Structure formats: structure tokens, C-alpha cells
Amino acid sequence: MQDREPEGTGNELDEEDEWQLYASAGYASSELEAEEKDSEEDKPGEIWFDGDDFDSERSTVNWDSPPCPAPLGIAHVIKIGVCNHCLIRISGFRSRGSGPDSGAAIREEALLRDRELQSKITQDYCPLCENLFEDIENIVDRLFDTLSDTDFSTMQFGIHLPKDLLQEEDRIRSKYGAPGSYHLKGAIVESIHKRIRELDKKVDFVKEKPDVMVLVDGLTLRVDVDVRPIFLYGRYRKLSRGIPQTRWPCRACRGRALGCESCEGTGLQYLDSVQDLIGEPIREALGAEDTSFHGMGREDIDVRCLGSGRPFVLEVKRPSRRKLPVEDLVEMVKINAPGKVEVDNLKWCTRTKINEVKQSRSEKTYMIRFRAEGIDDNEIAEQSILSLEGQVIDQETPKRVSHRRAAKTRRRKITSIDKVSFEGEEVEITLRCEAGTYVKELVHSDEGRTTPSVQSVLGKDCEVVRLDVLEIHAD
């Protein structure tokens, strides 16, 4: 018999939704900011001082002014060079709106109160944001250039800002801003959202499970886009032997492919797999980078899977398109894999379906054919085989999988034996058994590692000829 196909070839379940790792995705301060603020609150009160409280004309900046929204507080933050974007978010007048126009109106009111009011510190950048708000349009342009060929309807933003900028912004805002003044990260993300809406883009901004996740580097203005995978659930029938469930890397080059004569440069031990026969036409149709295949168990490479098929979830990574009719995808699989693999229907699902499929424990019905020499009486042999019905068998880890399975004894029940037929020296059995039963070993006993077995009750050496999965009782 052929080897059982390898497991753990890149189809392990990913960590649940890595999107939430972006610190600013909640539109507020990051955990780091919160920890820093907590540590600062434990310290005795400090008066921030940069060593120079005079402007070029030697007039004093009042560092002990009250916080916003007091008029003296507004005047003070204007003196230290705060831009209009930051003026509105720390002033305490959020009810007036947001953006530079609202900040300009507050600045104008302050100038009416004090005609000589002006910035007392000569600098090129706002001390709170370093003029990052002026780059919003640039960021949005870069984003939609990157996503020009990608379908999406929901989006989530994260932004990474330099630690020293966050510390400085938090220090000034905490001391001179109004209570509850808006964090820099949240304000920038809100401004990006506003700009996208102005462009009439059909996008919903969400905090969970977006189609695309965007991370902006506030220092370099680099825009990284992560396209969320999509998932399809279905059942497959494997009609041909010699096809592994997932990609099987070449044994000689271990999948590296370059210059390998054994796999002729493909990097694969077998050119076909259930994963690619189903996944490749779907990947191409959706413009995706790759696929991962998550099956409810797997059959050996030399075993067919018939009946209603084996449940699976196909994970499609970084798709450019997300909304093709599933009927069209089923037809593409049919054209791509005639006589090899069939899929009757597919439906969209979520990542949680992978856990459901992986953790399911379903009974299975098998048809196994084996050769047993020297059977003298078929009726006695049949009764001996039927005596296994309803029994609980003990199976030590089979030799053929001992390199990847823990050494232990498993107890499995033979639920029913429905049919025993004889053809010369060959015997064919249809049986239903508990999930996790090694059916080949149930027949030939694996040198006594499975007890009782067909071989032990017949008293004859048994050699498996072929095995088919007739049904997986999952629903």
C-alpha cells in the first residue's frame, strides 16, 4: 500500500483574527500609551519645562496657565504653536465640529480677545502632531492606489506613531488640554475616514472583521494593506486513488524545487492534490495569492472518498475579488478536475467554521477489500467477521504513522458490519465505525497491535487490497 499522506503541511489553523493586534484599531490610545499614562500618574506632579521659556523678543511664555477651554488656556496653546487641527481637538469645543476650519474659528476668537496674541515659539511643526494632519490626503491617495485592484466594502485603520511624539503629545495635552480631549491617533484616523467619505468611496469603517486592514506609519507615511481572507465550506468526493488531500512537498528537495530532477522543478511529490484541484480554479477566479485547505480529517492517498463527501473549508488568501456566485466556482472545479474530485455545492462561511470542521468527531462507513488465503468455509468465515460487530477494539499507534503520532492505545467501537462478500481469495466488508478507527489495521492487525482484528478472528493472514470511505456521517 502507498504511504499515508503527510500532515501539518501548512494547513494549521491560524491565530484567531490577527487584525486586533493593531494598537490603534480601536480609534484611541494604544495599550502602551495607557501603561505610560498609569506610570506617570504614580509620579509626583511635574511642571514641564524645556529649558527655554522666552521667545526671540525675550517675552515670557506662561507655562503655568490654566488648561483649555479657559481663554488663557486657549491663548497659551496658541502661543506654543499648536495647529488648527490640534487646537479644536484639545480645546474642549468638540461640539463645534472637527477639522482645521473649526480650529481656525477658535483661533480667531482668541485673537479678538487679544490682538497681540501670536505664537511665542518659533518652530516649523505643531508640537502635538508635527503637522501630520497635512499628510492626510497623501495617505488616502497612497491607500487607494494600493487597493486599486481589490474589491472591499469594509475597512479598519491602524496607525503607528513614534513613541517620542506620543509621549510629548500626551504630556502637553494632559496638562493644557481640556478634560476628555481627543487622542492624536483617534483624531488622525477620524480625519482619514472623513477624507475617504469626501471622495464618496463606498466603504464602511468597522472595528471587527474588516475586508481590509490598513496600517499607516506616521513617520514614513508608508501604507501597508492586509486583505482579509475569505472562506468557503463544502464537501468533496475524491474519485481517484493516488491523490493526496493537501500539497505534498517533494521528498528529494523538500519543496524547494530549483534544479530538482525528482519533481522536475515543481517542488511537489504529486502534481495533483484535492487542495489544488479545488483551490486553484477558485484562487484564479478570485485573484488570490494562495489557499489553505482544512478538512474534517483526511483519507490515505490510496483511498477514495465517496458518498456525500468529506467536509472541508477552503481559505482563500488575499483575494482581489470577493463576491463571485458560488455556483460559478463549483462549475470551475468541475471543469478543472473531471474524474478526480467533485464538489456539489459551496457556501461562504467564517473562520470559526474551521474549528467546527477540525473538531468534529463523526462516524464513518467504509468498504474494505482484502486477501485472505486458505479460507475453507465462507459461512464460518463470515460469522467470524460478523462477531466483531458492536465490539470495542484496542489499537496501538500503527507502525506506519508512529513517526508522527503519539504512542498510545486507542479504544474504538465497531458500530456495525453490514455486508461480507467473498470472491475467490478476496473478501469485501462494509462496516461503520467510530471516528479515529484505523480500518486497515483492523483487518491485518498490524502485527497484533490491533486486537481483536479480522485476521485474529479468521486465523488467516490478511492483506488489504483497497479501501474506500463510503460515507462521513457529519450532519
Image: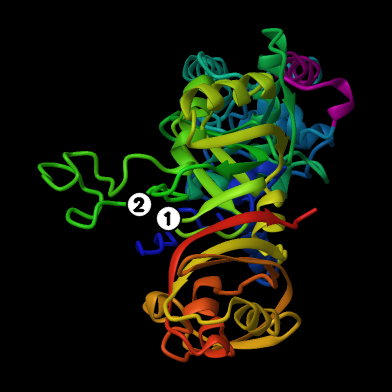
- Helix, strand or loop for disc 1: loop
Please check the rendered image and state whether residue 106 is part of the magenta-colored stretch, yes or no: yes
- Specify whether 245 is left or right of 343: left
Where residue 118 appears, as percent x and y from the top left, is 63, 22
Q: Residues in magenta?
A: 93-111
Q: Residue placed at 60% from the left, 21% from the top?
A: 331
Classify mark 2: residues with Cα within 10 Å, few (<14), some (14-19) or many (20+). many
- Specify whether 123 is left or right of 197: left
Please check the rendered image and state whether residue 321 is part of the magenta-colored stretch, yes or no: no
Q: Residue placed at 68% from the left, 54% from the top?
A: 471
Front-most of residues 81 and 354: 354
* Residue 228 at least partly seen: no
Front-most of residues 289 and 55: 289
Dominant secondary structure, magenta: helix
Where residue 448 appears, as percent x and y from the top left, is 46, 91
Disc 2 versus disc 1: nearer the observer:
1
Q: Is residue 162 above or below residue 86?
A: below
Q: How many marks?
A: 2
Where residue 421 appears, as percent x and y from the top left, is 61, 65
Q: Residue placed at 48% from the left, 84% from the top?
A: 445
Front-most of residues 201 and 91: 201
Residue picked out by circle 2: 248
Q: Is residue 469 above or below residue 116?
A: below
Q: Amino acid at mark 1?
A: Ile
Residue picked out by circle 1: 301
* Residue 145 at least partly seen: yes
**Which circle's residue, 2 or 1, is located before the other in the chain?**
2
